[in-house]
Image (cartoon, rainbow, N blue to C red):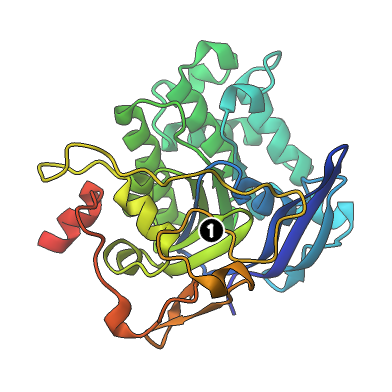
Amino acid sequence: MALLEVRDLSVSFATPDGVVQAVRSLSFDVDRGTTLAIVGESGSGKSVATQTITGLTRGARVSGSARFDGVELIGASPKTLQGIRGAKIGMIFQDPLSSLHPYYTVGWQIVEMIRAHRPQTATATARARAAELLGLVGIPGAAKRLDDYPHQFSGGMRQRVMIAMAMALDPALLIADEPTTALDVTVQAQVLGVMQRLQEEFGTAIVLITHDLGVVAQMSDDVVVMYAGRAMERAPRRTLFYLPHNPYTRGLLASLPAQGGTRTRLTPIAGTPPSLIDPPEQCPFASRCPDVFDHCRHEVPRLDPVARDPRHTSACFLPKDGASLRPVPGAGRPATVRQEESA
């Protein structure tokens, strides 16, 4: 049994303009000690899906199932969710400056989080644990920096503080929502390295939400590609980069910059995503797809296995035999994937 099993998750919000169907029939599994990356352009439903799992989308209309370690999270009581969130499921949000309280020191905030879930822990013990965590994530002079405020840390350091806080109680699952956004390349590599090191040490499963395929290549074991609230393709990382099936996935890969090679211009995906207010019952990518045909405009494709591989599924009406799988011509691939190939 997987650590997290999500089945047919749908999330919608009532707005003055209509009902926004942010997530539609999303399913995925996360095994212990593995990393699942959820990718897609802005507005595809990545963050809403994971926030719903942890009970953070108040006022939303939710259906489906999300079982964490055998416990159903959808419809769970606030008390049940509070006991799981933070203690068993850690979360790293996109903007650490807005996630950390500006009026309290980082040490106080980590201690408070520990004692909120383990009230029997002495303050001195929790403070020592906080210093240990800051040291684990690579903050120099960790014991002294406990008394500093968030604004006294750089962006990369604040993100490390968030990772330390999320890992304080050794959660089984870590949800990282765009953890490297707005960080420069060097700091991004350091933050990802910290997450990988902690995963190796504690066996933590990670759900990584990102639009950066370079991060996906470095961190993930499996990938879910989302578009307009739906999962378009699911596959192991190498399969997705080298033999993608869905035209949307292929479009994402073709839009990557080529390194050392053949293309001088990026290949964008033409058009814009559909409105999620009363979306049409057709393939959500039909209006932008270069391979569209009549069937795509009248029915929503299911996620079916590609080349008889249950680990690789695609929501597309194109043939799913092995002959249909081919590399994306001229696509730039992140360096991590290329290095693995040469090895």
Q: Residue furthest front?
A: 294
Badge 1 crowding class, 10 Å Cα cut-off, few under 14, some 14 to 19, many 20 or more, is: many
Task: Tell me the quadrant of the picture where the C terminus can be found.
Answer: bottom left
Residue 171 position in % (x across, y down): 60, 54
Viewer-proximal residue among 222 and 143: 222
* Drawn side of residue 60 relative to residue 177, left or right: right
Residue at the spot 64% in from the left edge and 55% down from the top edge: 229
Pick the front one: 85 or 266 = 266
Does residue 199 lie above or below 296 as drawn? Answer: above
Please give the name of the residue rendered at 69% of the width and 40% of the height, measured from the top-left corner.
114
In the rendered image, which quarter is residue 34 located in?
A: bottom left
| Amino acid type of the residue that numbered disc 1 sits on in the rendered structure | Phe
Residue 30, percent across and down? 54, 67
Q: Name the residue beneath numbered marker 1.
A: 285
Report the residue at 54% width, 45% height from top: 176
* Most distant residue in the bottom direction: 308
In the visual, does 291 lie left or right of 11?
A: left
* Front residue (pair 68, 331): 331
Residue 182 image point, x, y percent: 45, 26
Based on the displayed image, in which of its 4 quarters is residue 116 positioned?
Answer: top right
Q: From the top left corner, tell me how far across and down residue 185 is, in percent.
A: 31, 30
Name which residue lies at 35% across and 67% down: 244
Quarter of the image with the N terminus in it: bottom right
Is 98 positioned to the left or the right of 186 in the image? right
| Number of marks in the rendered image | 1
